[in-house]
Image: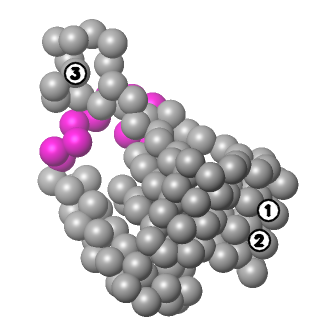
Amino acid sequence: MLAGELYRADDPELQAGLRRAAELQRRFNDGGDPAVLRELLGSVGEDAEVRPPLYVDYGSHVTIGPRAFLNYGAVLLDVAPITIGADAQIGPGVQLLTPTHPLDARLRDKWEAAEPITLHDNVWLGGG
């Protein structure tokens, strides 16, 4: 999955990761607790701010750099790694989506793939 190879989204191990992330995501979105955010995500840099609600697949594949800011309603579908650099500014409702699907229609109903996303330092993405 992380290497960009085809995988099955209904794999039991992946489903367990989705359930873990859903519970932590719910807790973060209910109260905005930075400790829960640090448990949910792979890495959160010093003085980074994420405003709830935040939506992820696994969370553990997301790295947020120091002083980065993610506004309300970010969607980070992190089947592959998502890296957000230092001092990046992300507007409300931004979606970073790593999943892709095979071009061959015969594979599309069972298989998925993913490509990583990297936003370098000082990137700004406006709302939506």
Q: Quadrant of residue 43?
A: bottom right
Give the residue displayed 60% in from the left and 41% down from the top.
117
Q: Is residue 113 left or right of residue 43?
A: left
Q: Between disc 2 and disc 1, whose residue precedes?
A: 2
Q: Nearer the viewer, residue 7 or 127?
A: 127
Q: Residue at x 43, y 89 (%)?
A: 31
Amino acid type at image mark 3:
Arg
Tell me which residue sits at (51%, 48%) in the image.
95
Distance of label 3 from label 2 (alpha carbons): 38 Å
Amino acid type, residue under disc 2 in the picture: Pro
- Magenta stretch: give its range: 1-11
| Lower position in the chain sequence, tag 3 or tag 2 | 2
Q: Is residue 127 above or below residue 4?
A: below
Please give the residue where the numbered disc 1 appears in the rendered image.
86
| Mark sitting on residue 66 | 2
User: Residue at point 65% right, 58% down?
Assistant: 91
Q: Which residue is mark 3?
A: 108
Q: What crowding class fits label 2: few (fewer than 14 Cα within 10 Å), some (14-19), or many (20 or more)?
A: some
52 to the left or right of 29: right
Residue 1: % across, % down: 38, 39
Magenta portion: prevailing SS class: loop
Q: Is residue 21 above or below residue 88?
A: below
